[in-house]
Amino acid sequence: MLNFMVHHSIQMHFSKINHQFLFNIKPLLGKSLVLLFLLFSIIMVSSCSNAVSFSPEHISQTSGRYLYSPDELMEVHYKDNHLFLTWKGATTEPVVLDENTFFVPDMYSKLRFVQDPKTKKRYLGIVSKDDDQVVNYAYLKVADSFKTPSMHLEAKEFDQALEGFLKVKPQDSIEAIVNESKFNRLGYDYLRDKDYANAIAVFKMNVALYPNSDNVYDSLADAYLRSGDSLQAFTNYSKAYELNTGNERAQNYIEAYNKKQD
């Protein structure tokens, strides 16, 4: 308890100095230098105290996965009383400030474990740079069984993947997550391996996501044709040609198919 009080006193004192110092020099410094100074300050505060001791209850409540974006997770875990954060494929040890608060240099953000008093849901909140008491409920804690759309896709759970991507698409203005070309490449990866069922499933998902694209129907028709289903190939090539009369492959197949029916 005494160590905590000493640490808290040092932190508050150092914080006041930092705020006053930054207020005076901020006009003279660039953003990068200010961030570096803040990081240095946090490290100095952290080094002035013994390591924070995490209670078993705290570890149980905060360990797990948090939704960083609609298709990306962060994972919090502990080892030997040290907190670790796995994010974007890398594991880092943040600068711990107290049991609930830590600084992540890669994000240039101070995060805090918080719980919504109304919903009782837990979050990793972003602490305001201007007011340490203001926290944005940024990253929702999700169940260990939770899967993002891309995780469903990787597991070949195409219906669940499609459901997730349909929800994400309206929010995905830059198409970094829901990407027609990316899904098309995946379908052709399956097709090259003669995995026709999975290729068709991916192309059908792409059709549902991009119903006005002739290319997705063309790819689906190609997969059906290679699998031996000429009728479905004709149906989808016809749709591709309807959307784009300049699609020569679709036109050639439709003409050849119709000749066979005569």
Image (cartoon, rainbow, N blue to C red):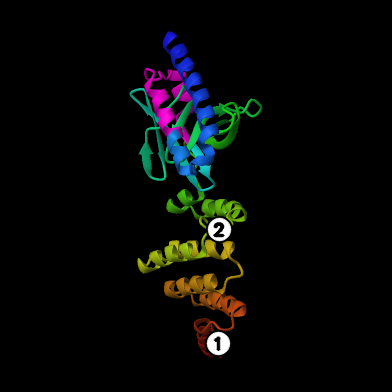
Q: Residue at x 53, y 58 (%)?
A: 178
Q: Position of residue 78 (x, y in %)?
A: 38, 28
Q: Any magenta on residue 39? A: yes
For badge 2, the amino acid type reads Ile
Mark 1 is surrounded, within 10 Å at the Cα level, by few (under 14), some (14 to 19) or many (20 or more) other residues, namely few
Mark 2 is surrounded, within 10 Å at the Cα level, by few (under 14), some (14 to 19) or many (20 or more) other residues, namely few
The residue that mark 1 highlights is 258
Q: Quadrant of residue 89?
A: top left
Which part of the image, by quadrant, shows the N terminus? top left
Q: Residue at x 55, y 54 (%)?
A: 165
Label 2 vs label 1, nearer the camera? 2
Q: Main secondary structure of the magenta part?
A: helix
Q: Secondary structure at mark 1?
A: helix
The residue that mark 2 highlights is 174
Image position of 49 with respect to 213: above or below: above
In depth, the one of 28 and 114 nearer the eye is 28
Q: Residue at x 53, y 73 (%)?
A: 215
Q: Which of the numbered marks, if any, corresponds to residue 72?
A: none
**Region rendered in magenta:** 38-65
Looking at marks 2 and 1 on the same chain, the residue that comes earlier in the sequence is marked by 2
**Inter-mark Cα distance, 2 to 1:** 41 Å
For badge 1, the amino acid type reads Asn
Determine if residue 80 is in view.
Answer: yes
Going by the image, does 40 lie left or right of 239? left
Q: Position of residue 141 (x, y in %)?
A: 53, 34
Point out the residue furthest to the top here. 2
